[in-house]
Amino acid sequence: MLGGETPRAAVKTASGRLKVAEWLKLIENKTAMAGDSNSAMASYDFSWLWAELGISELRR
């Protein structure tokens, strides 16, 4: 999904930032819908990763 780049490498370009944002949204959505809503992963907060990659403004 990131064209073989790491998330840190991908966020260095505008198009890469969008790809990483899409990838994180996919992970968040799949994790939230993955079954037991009481599991630790269903309620996992990915916000630290958005901030770490410097793309928090793309999170909607």
Image: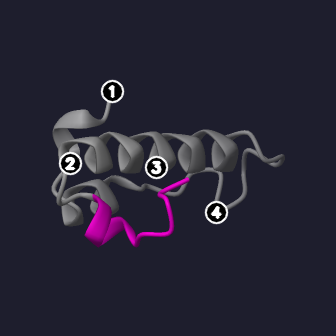
Q: Mark 3 points at which residue?
A: 24
Q: Earlier in the sequence, mark 1 or mark 2?
A: 2
Which quarter of the picture shows residue 9? Answer: bottom left
Vertical side of 6 occupied by 59: above or below: above
Chain part drawn in magenta: 1-10
Q: Name the residue under label 2.
A: 55
Of 18 and 31, nearer the camera is 18
- State the separation of the CA atoms marked 1 and 3: 11 Å
Counting from the top left corner in percent of width and height, residue 47 is at: 32, 53
Q: Which of marks 3 and 2 is nearer the N terminus?
A: 3
The local secondary structure at tag 1 comes to loop
Q: Which amino acid does label 2 sit on?
A: Ile
Which of pointers 4 and 2 indicates the residue nearer the eye? 2
- State the separation of the CA atoms marked 3 and 2: 10 Å
CB atoms at circles 1 and 3 under 8 Å apart? no
Specify the quadrant that holds the C terminus.
Answer: top left
Q: Which of marks 4 and 3 is nearer the N terminus?
A: 3
- State the separation of the CA atoms marked 1 and 4: 22 Å
Which of pointers 1 and 2 indicates the residue nearer the eye? 2
Please indicate whether residue 54 sits to the left or right of residue 20 in the image.
left
Which of pointers 1 and 4 indicates the residue nearer the eye? 1
Counting from the top left corner in percent of width and height, residue 7 is at: 36, 66
Q: Which amino acid does label 3 sit on?
A: Leu
Vertical side of 60 occupied by 23: above or below: below
Which of pointers 4 and 3 indicates the residue nearer the eye? 3
The local secondary structure at tag 3 comes to helix
Q: Earlier in the sequence, mark 1 or mark 4?
A: 4
CB atoms at circles 1 and 4 under 8 Å apart? no
Q: Mark 1 points at which residue?
A: 60
Is 59 covered by the magenta stretch?
no
Q: Residue at x 73, y 44 (%)?
A: 37
